[in-house]
Image (tube, rainbow, N blue to C red):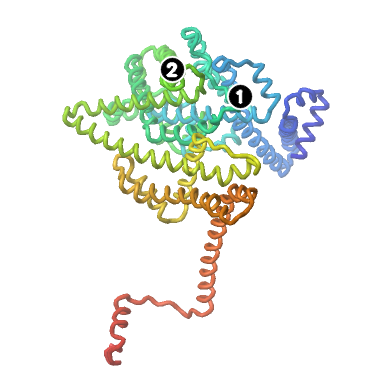
Amino acid sequence: AFCPYHIGHFSIVGLGFEEYVQASHFEGLITTIVGYVLLAVTLIVCHGLAALVKFQRSRRLLGVCYIVVKVSLLVVVEIGVFPLICGWWLDICSLEMFDATLKDRELSFQSAPGTTMFLHWLVGMVYVFYFASFILLLREVLRPGVLWFLRNLNDPDFNPVQEMIHLPIYRHLRRFILSVIVFGSIVLLMLWLPIRIIKYLLPNFLPYNVMLYSDAPVSELSLELLLLQVVLPALLEQGHTRQWLKGLVRAWTVTAGYLLDLHSYLLGDQEENENNANQQPNNQHARNNNAIPVVGEGLHAAHQAILQQGGPVGFQPYRRPLKFPLRIFLLIVFMCITLLIASLICLTLPVFAGRWLMSFWTGTAKIHELYTAACGLYVCWLTIRAVTVLVAWMPQGRRVIFQKVKEWSLMIMKTLIVAILLAGVVPLLLGLLFELVIVAPLRVPLDQTPLFYPWQDWALGVLHAKIIAAITLMGPQWWLKTVIEQVYANGIRNIDLHFIIRKLAAPVISVLLLSLCVPYIIASGVVPLLGVTAEMQNLVQRRIYPFLLMVVVLMGILSFQVRQFKRLYEHIKNDKYLVGQRLVNYERKSGKQGTSTTPPQSSQE
């Protein structure tokens, strides 16, 4: 850090760019990166001079230093700069959706530059991650070799560090510019253009209401955490969202393939390849016009193909139709239209459904758009799920449908009861206990009265319950872990209401109620009988919960240490006095105990 910073600082001062660097609010970071760039250039020049004068050891050492600096700069560009560019571009293209301007973003950057840059980097990283996940899903559907121009992250031979070392800088720069163009074009297609169309067709639909009110009794951040940590993971894991998306992609691919006669190119012809394998084994490679070698051509050729083209090793031949470039162009146009329509639906349908449903509850009051989007998304998901289930049941007849509806109704009733207990009562008690033990003693002075908001306590209690359940499942084996694993193993279809209430809900709720009630009874019922002052009663009422928590934690630590000392005592005793160990049959041992009162002859036997 020291040398590159001062090298960059002297260079910036000498070139007269000091004012521009100071205006960026990240003077240290930019100066250090400039110093690293100058170091890399210096190492290249010295490496070339060492090669001219044939200093082999110096040349090798300078080459290794240059590789380290080069890989470090490329990692900064790939992980830091590129997501930051994507995040800012997403923000700029979505300004009209939130009724904001560039002036607002400039003011927020000047007031909190670090937070603003981090949030934009985080949004860009999430966008890049989900884009890469969608590419992986496409590889599961499409024919191997269609996406040859994109790097396969699941390829065992793919080594990003090796690519950074071997490929020259201009190729990395070309790839970076191409990635920026592709990602930026997709943002324009799926965000900026749909927003313009929505503002033209539905003038009153936008902007989204995302204002956070600090004086609201319920924190908006609680619901955001709840949605991001509980609702969306459950929707993606339990809702078969990935399978539905994969099915939609496959259906679209099949439709586009038959409309444009590109079925062989997009999905491949397995049967045709197997039939022609014995007839024309030598014509397969000549028929495919791709330069990527087949696996059978040798590992070295395949490895060179990865280094030179960045394409996957796996490849399937395909049938090339007439006017192939025109068909590929029409395929790209069809894909852009589909992405535009899908983006329009995703931006309007969930929010419209959520606003319509929320209007029955809140009337004309404006609420956070995250509420309406989440509500509409769940309604759309439930509708699609119900339709798919009914379509699957229709061929089985009316009697089977009624039987299935009866079974599902009973299962839904059981699930609602379990949800009320485990997702309603337990998080509420846990959040209230956390508020009394941690939050209220730290935030509220003794001369003020703490206020409790059940909705916010419940939302935070859900997060605490999720964290406790995760820690329990990762911890040692005990009764709570066994019960939770059994509930997970049974699932929703085989839910056992009696087992959950008797083994999980009742003990947990009893412990939480005792933790809440016993300190309150002591502070409000026992302490006033002792004749203490009002200030002491208030002090006991406010501090008894954290005091009992300290007592419980101390008792747990003491019991743990006692068990550890017992184990240490047994270990020391065995090391000092134990001569040996012998495996003894359990039945012979019991026989000796049973015949201990018999004469010596029988005991010797």
The answer to whether one can see residue 335 in this image is no
User: Badge 1 is on which residue?
Assistant: 85
**Residue 194 % position (x, y):** 49, 14
Q: Amino acid at mark 1?
A: Ile
In depth, the one of 276 and 417 nearer the eye is 417
Is 473 above or below relative to 123? below
User: Badge 2 is on which residue?
Assistant: 352
**Residue 399 % position (x, y):** 16, 30
**Residue 366 % position (x, y):** 51, 19
In the picture, residue 116 is in which quadrant? top right
- As drawn, the residue found furthest toward the top would be 200
Q: Is residue 277 left or right of residue 454?
A: left
Near mark 1 (Cα within 10 A), the count class, few <14, some 14-19 or many ≥20, is some
Q: Which mark is residue 590?
A: none
Residue at 30% from the left image edge and 45% from the top image edge: 496
Q: Amino acid at mark 2?
A: Phe
